[in-house]
Image (tube, coloured by chain):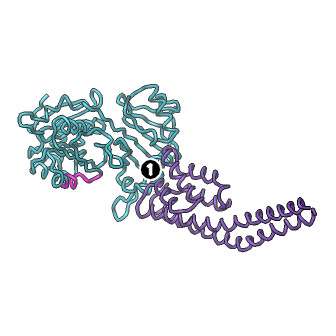
Chain colours: A cyan, B purple
Amino acid sequence: MQKNINNKFLTIKINLIIKKFDKKYNEKILEIRLRIKQALEIITYKGKYFIDNEGYKVIAQKAYYISKDDIKKSLLVLTQNSIYALERQFKEGFITIPGGHRVGIAGKVVIENGRIKTQKDINSINFRISNEIPGIANKIINNIYDKKIDYIYNTLIISPPLCGKTTLLRDFIRIISSDIGKKIAVVDERSEIAGIYNGIPGNKIGPRTDILDNCPKAKGMIMLIRSMSPEVIAVDEIGKDEDIKAIKEAVYSGVSVLATVHGKDLKSIKVNQKLKEFYLEKIFKRYITLSKRNGVGTIENIYNERGDGLI
Amino acid sequence: MILKFSGAFLILISGSILGWIIAEQYTKRVQQLQELQMAIKVLDTEISYSSTFLPEALIHSGEKSTYPISFIFKETGKNMLNNRELIFSDIWIKILEENFYYNSLNNSDIKLLKNWGKQLGASHLKDQEKINKIILQQLKQNELIAREEAREKVKLFRYSGLLLSLLLIIVFY
């Protein structure tokens, strides 16, 4: 049984269509996309499809069209009729719901004093279903863990969106925490790794994992080093200058770092203005590149700090 | 003779009670409109200062009110928690309609509350504060009208009940 989105976060109408689709095709859903006056789209591991009222895969013209009311009701259901309580999330462009699923929203951006204040008149909602696949990292854990010296190599997972970066990172965290037995601290800025809702993790992340939820990565890493004495720190989707600085500080403090970043391959890191110093200074000892070539989560290669492929 | 006296007595009592009940509706409407404003002020504080989610905010403000306003707020909040896939305005309107005969609010008050319910929770903080401010002003206005009506009609209905029952007794006996 696939881990799907809790039907209580979709309107009755959309939920019914999704259920019909699920029953007919039983394909693991990655995204449910609602765009105002556009066809309802579902993205699964097998492809992208427009869906009609009965849950059938159809061409766009025959699909169920999302009305303004669908978007309005979806937002109300999603926010428990409390849009005012989620202004910060609207500003950031996503809401996290139980299970670690991320719901992206796009609308009219409200700017105040040159900064994004919030979004209104939402026209697009994207339910990104978090996929927890315990065991996915089993076969490559030995590439990032040196048993002889009991050490986790600083590792950077590189892939374009929707290739399974977070899923792999989550499973590494679970293995390091439960099987290897190290203290691991996670800065879960978007509540996607642990899927924390109301303080309770929704995903399997191991018994020795400390989670700093909803916290900016750079600040969170420093806080965790000082407060939780971790042996390993894990963060998702790095990219800002302060993230790079914080990762270096963690590494120099003797803490192993596991991180993910958007990119096509190792080359995209080597040429990236901000990230290339990781490669030049040999901060990360392992680079794992992912793709969708043979399905989401295909491991393209694992490189060492010199850029030599290990598989 | 005893039967006649008992009958007359019953008519007198029933007429007076009827008049008293009708008159009481006017007094209760004023009290309930005040109570409603108080509950909305608590709700507004929950929304503005602690960004409490609407179901919990409704339950909290219901807990600080008295029946029947407390029931309407708490029941809506509980229904929202139990039926996440439903939207607030649908639940709110249903509960207002179901409880119409258990409170003293009139159609004009209910209409205001229904319209307010269509906007509550559906926009950002500043808008919510404005919406709550407007409903409080409208309810205050209705309270003033209700107060005036109560002043004019409470005594009228109380005496009318008594006098009409006396009239009936004279006509029949």
Q: Which residue is mark 1?
A: A79
Q: Residue at 25% across / 48% down in the picture?
A: A211
Along the viewing direction, whichever of A189 and B3 lies nearer the viewer: B3
Residues A9 and A182: in front is A182
Would you say A186 lies left or right of B45 here?
A: left
- Report crowding for label 1: few under 14, some 14 to 19, many 20 or more residues within 10 A (C-alpha): many
Q: Is residue B138 visible?
A: no
Q: Quadrant of the C terminus of chain B?
A: bottom right
Q: Determine whether the residue tagged by mark 1 lies in a helix, strand or loop.
A: loop
Q: Is residue B6 left or right of residue A231?
A: right
Segment tinted magenta in the rendering:
A214-223
Residue A140 lies in the magenta-colored region: no
Height in image: A86 above or below A201?
Answer: below
Q: Position of residue A278 (x, y in %)?
A: 13, 46
Pinpoint residue A14: horizontal percent, then vertical percent.
49, 38
Q: How many marks?
A: 1
Instruction: Assess whether residue A218 is covered by the magenta stretch.
Output: yes
Q: Quarter of the image containing the N terminus of chain B?
A: bottom right
Residue B159 visible in the current orientation: yes
Front position in the image: B137 or A198? A198
Apparent side of residue A119 relative to residue A207 in the rendered image (left or right): right
Chain of the residue under label 1 = A
